[in-house]
Image (tube, coloured by chain):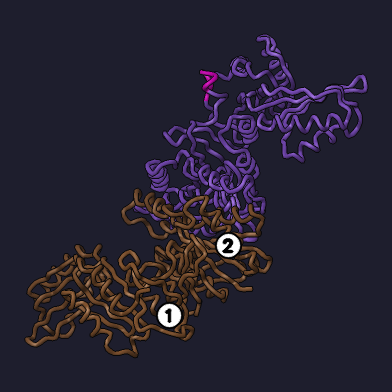
Chain colours: A purple, B brown
């Protein structure tokens, strides 16, 4: 008998029929002799409907109250799923954030989990019941309702699995698992059976949007095995786990990419200490997240400094940068919002030389110019012109032998 | 400075524009120097939408879980209203049932309030804030969400007013107040400025559906002045209060009526002790509420026994009655679902003879046959054929001089 946490996203519970299907799957797992906790999102479209109501009242709605409104979406789903399960003859009990409780900080609309109670849920499991938990929500120390931000239900599920010391956290989604790259771009993209949390983190954060990043961080921190699988079939998906549980690690596990990129360059900046802080502080103050930063070596007392931001922040970032440029005496600011980032991810990269070189050679052979590079222990990211994205992904996928 | 509880029903918060209007009215009361607590229902149609979702999953949905689903309607409204108020520059804070807390018994879908916390709301008021409270909902001792049943928001409002020792509980609705009878039937129906709780109770329970009965009971028990008024204008409405606060009481305050009636008669029942219990127990077991009961005097060892039920229960009640009739040896069961009940209500009736006689004479003069009568200290109800309802209301309204 295992303790299994199953998480179903908005599309998996988007209609009454789909809720019935989720109930059947949870019931089947229960019938197989397991203890089952189901974590659900709001029915698809519901969160947007609720936020849309609030948006009609205020451009920037009060965030405490926005969470009061938004958290009802998941509350409806847990009630409906528990009704479906009891109607099938199973014991089931729903839990909102305050009933578990899922304690968070007070950062409304993007709260972070601090602590999760386990006794209420365990009582239900011990009585042979199925626990149905609202994802995305918690309460702060004053008893106010909080939400974890978009995609927070994944985090709820993994956090609950950690608190209950569950054997596995199954994340049901509309894809079969994590692939070596997007199958829409590479026909021979292959599903990965197992990957390390670290690889999952890079693949998720780099645009292979299967799982919310924070949920993987949680899994890594507490050692929760995460099984990403399809809610439409019974095929095994991809298991993210600790590196030591993976017998054979490939040098490169997958190729991720993101087209949501824009690049800004400060040209001919006086190269003095503290200049980077002067450039990035106004951006941070404007709530703009800077991703890749590339600074050329200075030989003349001047340097060029390039960084990327999300494409949606491009206009605002350019405005901020223009002001900063005058203050610090940069010659000019140039930008380009037709940029993509392609990343090669793999645990074994640490101990294998030559991966970067192979990337450069492969892209160069296709005439693809590299506009910037960053590397970490387990990934290499290159910035390229957006129009080359698919080509770059395909040739790298082949070059590293990732095909099925 | 007064402490004012304002309650707005589903139609008053049915759209974003209407929610803004409610915010304006609450803000204006706050600007006038009062402490304001607003209690709101779900946006009109929302509760039905939620119950409709549940109904697609089960004919009789699990009631604990149904409350989890249904209570979200009010939660959305409090969040939206608090957003509207903060957007207008006011301090506002929403409260769900568990945050106040409104403690109830565990009778899901029809819970009764046991205790209401006041410190959380008072903290908000002391800081100059407007408290926005979800009607209709509470929590039981295990922390499960409960709802108070249809119209429960009125009860929430009066109960919160009682807990806070509010000066008045204003119930905003789509009518101007309580009238001597339905203005759609009597052109000269007159709005009552003040009535006693007892009269309000009879008028509400007898079909003048302005307020939920339980809320009036609460008001009576805790002495909460209830001001029923329109959310569409600033006219004073009707204040329900303790009898001693009403200087001048009319003999008859109003005429109520209900067409939701059906009549069932057991013919020629052996008149033995315990026979009434044998007749009514199966009806109670079938969850059918019996209203008026009339039993003829027995002179032959047999009696006829007539009672009324809600028209929606008529078919089921007839089936139950047919079975009972065989068991107790009644000659037959006859029924009629085209029955109306007209009630004459007034506090001073207690000390005035001749009211009943005037009713009988007035109806008789119009050729309206009385099919049954019940009386209490402050009301006389007569059963008549449904087709005479409007005529009966009009002639009684005139006979007792209720016109404006």
Discs 1 and 2 carry the same chain letter: yes
> Crowdedness of circle 2 by 10 Å Cα count: few (<14), some, many (20+)?
many
Q: Which mark is residue B196?
A: 1
Tell me the magenta residue range. Answer: A183-190
Query: Is B51 placed left or right of A61 in the picture?
Result: left
Nearest the viewer among B186 and B47 is B186
Placement of B260 over or under A364, stated as above or below: below
Placement of A388 over or under B269, stated as above or below: above
Placement of A135 over or under A394, stated as above or below: below
Residue at (29%, 76%) from the top-left corner? B398
Q: Which mark is residue B26?
A: 2
Residue at (69%, 17%) from the top-left corner? A359
Nearest the viewer among B259 and A326 is B259
Query: Is A337 placed left or right of B72 in the picture?
Result: right
Nearest the viewer among B347 and B65 is B347
Q: Position of residue A183 (x, y in %)?
A: 52, 22
């Amino acid at each position: 008998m295992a303790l299994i946490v199953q998480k179903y996203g908005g599309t998996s519970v988007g209609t009454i029929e789909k809720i019935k299907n989720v109930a059947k799957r949870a019931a089947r797992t229960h019938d197989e002799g397991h203890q089952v906790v189901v974590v659900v999102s709001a029915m698809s479209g519901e969160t947007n409907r609720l936020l849309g109501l609030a948006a009609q009242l205020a451009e920037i709605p009060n965030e405490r109250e926005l969470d009061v409104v938004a958290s009802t979406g998941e509350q409806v789903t847990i009630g409906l799923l528990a009704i479906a399960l009891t109607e099938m003859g199973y014991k089931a009990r729903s839990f909102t954030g305050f009933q578990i409780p899922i304690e968070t900080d007070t950062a409304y609309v993007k709260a972070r989990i601090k602590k999760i109670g386990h006794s209420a849920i365990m009582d239900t499991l011990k009585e042979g019941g199925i626990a149905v938990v609202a994802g995305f929500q918690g309460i702060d120390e004053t008893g106010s309702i909080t939400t974890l931000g978009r995609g927070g239900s994944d985090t709820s599920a993994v956090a609950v699995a950690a608190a209950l010391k569950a054997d596995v956290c199954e994340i049901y989604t509309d894809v079969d698992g994590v692939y070596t790259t997007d199958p829409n771009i590479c026909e021979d993209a292959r599903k990965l059976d197992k990957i390390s949390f670290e690889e999952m983190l890079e693949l998720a954060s780099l645009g292979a949007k299967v799982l919310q990043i924070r949920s993987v961080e949680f899994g890594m921190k507490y050692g929760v095995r995460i099984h990403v699988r399809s809610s439409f079939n019974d095929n095994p998906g991809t298991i993210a786990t600790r590196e030591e549980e993976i017998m054979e690690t490939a040098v490169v596990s997958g190729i991720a990419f993101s087209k949501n990129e824009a690049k800004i360059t400060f040209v001919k900046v006086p190269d003095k200490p503290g200049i980077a802080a002067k450039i990035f502080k106004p951006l941070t103050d404007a709530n703009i997240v800077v991703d890749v930063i590339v600074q050329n070596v200075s030989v003349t007392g001047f340097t060029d400094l390039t960084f990327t931001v999300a494409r949606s922040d491009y206009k605002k970032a350019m405005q901020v940068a223009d002001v900063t440029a005058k203050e610090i005496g940069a010659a000019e600011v140039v930008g380009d919002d037709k940029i993509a980032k392609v990343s090669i991810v793999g645990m074994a990269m640490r101990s294998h030389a030559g991966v970067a070189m192979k990337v450069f050679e492969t892209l160069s052979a296709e005439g693809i110019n590299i506009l910037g590079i960053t590397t970490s222990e387990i990934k290499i990211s290159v910035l390229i012109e957006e129009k080359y994205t698919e080509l770059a992904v395909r040739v790298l996928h082949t070059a590293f032998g990732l095909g099925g």
